[in-house]
Image: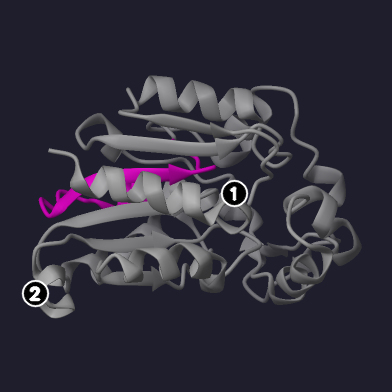
Amino acid sequence: MSTANAQVNKPTIVLVHGAFAESSSWNGVLTKLIAKGYPTVAVANPLRGVKSDAAYVASTLKDIKGSIVLVGHSYGGAVITNAVNSNKNVKALVYVAGFAPDAGETAIELSGRYPGSTLGPKLAPPVELTDGGKDLYIQQDKFHAQFAADVPASDAQLMASTQRPITEAALNEASGAPAWKSTPSWFIYGDRDLNIPPAALSFMAKRANSKETVVVNGASHVVMVSHSDAVAKLIDRAATAP
């Protein structure tokens, strides 16, 4: 079967990055998915607010024909939770160290519900925006240990230099009705995540009745970078599930 024909029968994998990252954080996963013949889209998440970011992703989904597997990392998990928006083409959700909030919950509240997050003190002084809001970054010299401890230092420095900021308001914005209540979900995260405590990720996976939850020993918050093979394999299993 040709690649073109194979792609016709495969869902499109749409990947949504989180805060302090950008679309290239999916490169390792993308390489493996493309090799398997999956059509793929790595969305440039605006990181401005849950509702507006979800609307942006939802508009991207409308242009995709056929079934979709929606993948979200970190804050991107909150975005995919709100982006399905009754789109019947979305067959699966995959949370990669991602928030899976219920209605009314926020990223800040969920990450603080259990001990273990050390993100707060590692943030740089907020950047004041003209609309009165604030942009948040991780201090570059703290980025490797906080965000990507199991990634080579040279790669982590590139990630630190290219990190995209998120607004303070986005992390405090309440989520809407969660897609995971009606769409099957899969979860993968590392047991050494310092941004979102593993206990919080475990809680969200169980609450969402995750079809499969993979905990990667020794993995940091960027499990899709350090363990791209495990993440790609889980996405493949979600994509091929009945």
Q: Nearer the viewer, residue 232 or 188?
A: 232
Name the side, left or right, on which 171 lies relative to 68.
Answer: right
Q: Quadrant of residue 178?
A: top left
The C terminus lies in quadrant: top left
Mark 1 crowd level (few <14, some 14–19, many ≥20, 10 Å Cα):
many
Q: Is residue 200 above or below residue 169?
A: above
Write the residue at 77% across / 44% down: 119
Q: Nearer the viewer, mark 1 or mark 2?
A: 2
Q: Which mark is drawn over residue 5?
A: 2
Q: Is residue 78 magenta?
A: no
Residue type marked 2: Asn
Instruction: Tell me whether the residue at label 1 lies in contact with that at label 2, contact meaning CB atoms closer than 8 angstroms.
Output: no
**Element marked by disc 2:** helix
Q: Quadrant of residue 194?
A: top right
Q: Nearer the viewer, residue 167 or 34?
A: 34
Mark 2 crowd level (few <14, some 14–19, many ≥20, 10 Å Cα):
few
Q: Nearer the viewer, residue 113 or 134?
A: 113
Task: Give the magenta part as a residue range.
Answer: 80-100
Residue 205, given in percent of the width and then of the height, sits at 43, 27
The residue at which mark 1 appears reads as 223
Residue 241, given in percent of the width and then of the height, sits at 19, 40
The N terminus lies in quadrant: bottom left
